[in-house]
Image: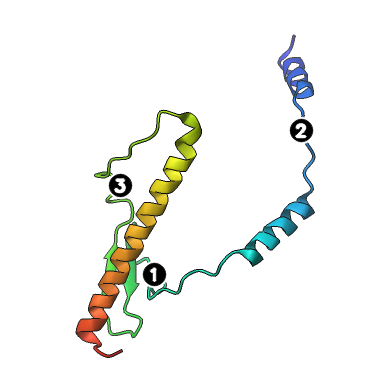
Amino acid sequence: MSDHGDLNEIMARLSFEPIDVYAEIEAARRAAAAAPLPEPSIIPMPEFPAFGLVRYPCPLGCGWHHDEHPGRDVAAERLVLPADVDRLDEALTAHAYARAEALKARIEAAISGHFEQAHPGR
């Protein structure tokens, strides 16, 4: 059998369920409307002055900034994955959320410390 014949045979055996794109979009809109609002944060919009560097400037524009190098800490970090393949997604998601929370806490602490030192009472 030719390559095309094999491929046609395989495709014929696959069953594709039609997707109602408009229903999917509407469901996503309803989910977004029902989702809680994000927590307010003191973290300003970042700048990207050099490849791999993320800079968080003082919101008051005094010239101070806090730099982060995303991914630098990952090389030294140990990631333990479960033997159960069905729990792999859950483990990776939990790890990503923990790293995001640690990053947020680190940036907020730097900005709060700067405000206490350079802009007391603000």
Viewer-nearest residue: 46 or 113: 113
Q: Residue at x 48, y 40 (%)?
A: 89
Who comes first in sequence, dot 2 or dot 3? 2
Cα separation between marks 1 and 3: 20 Å
How far across and how far down the image is residue 107, in percent?
31, 67
Q: Quadrant of the N terminus?
A: top right
- Label 2: state its secondary structure: loop
Q: How is the image coloured?
A: rainbow
Q: Residue furthest bottom?
A: 121
Q: Which quadrant of the structure image shows residue 103?
A: bottom left
Above-or-below relation of 25 to 91: below
Upstream in sequence: badge 1 or badge 3: 1
Q: Which residue is mark 3?
A: 74
Q: Which residue is mark 1?
A: 46
What x and y, as percent, mark residue 20?
79, 48
Disc 1 element = loop
> Distance from label 2 to label 3 (Cα)?
39 Å
Name the disc covering residue 16, or none.
2
What amino acid type is highlighted by mark number 3?
A: Val
Q: Position of residue 122 (x, y in %)?
A: 31, 89
9 left or right of 76?
right
**Labels 1 and 2 touching (C-beta < 8 A):** no
Q: Residue at x 28, y 40 (%)?
A: 78
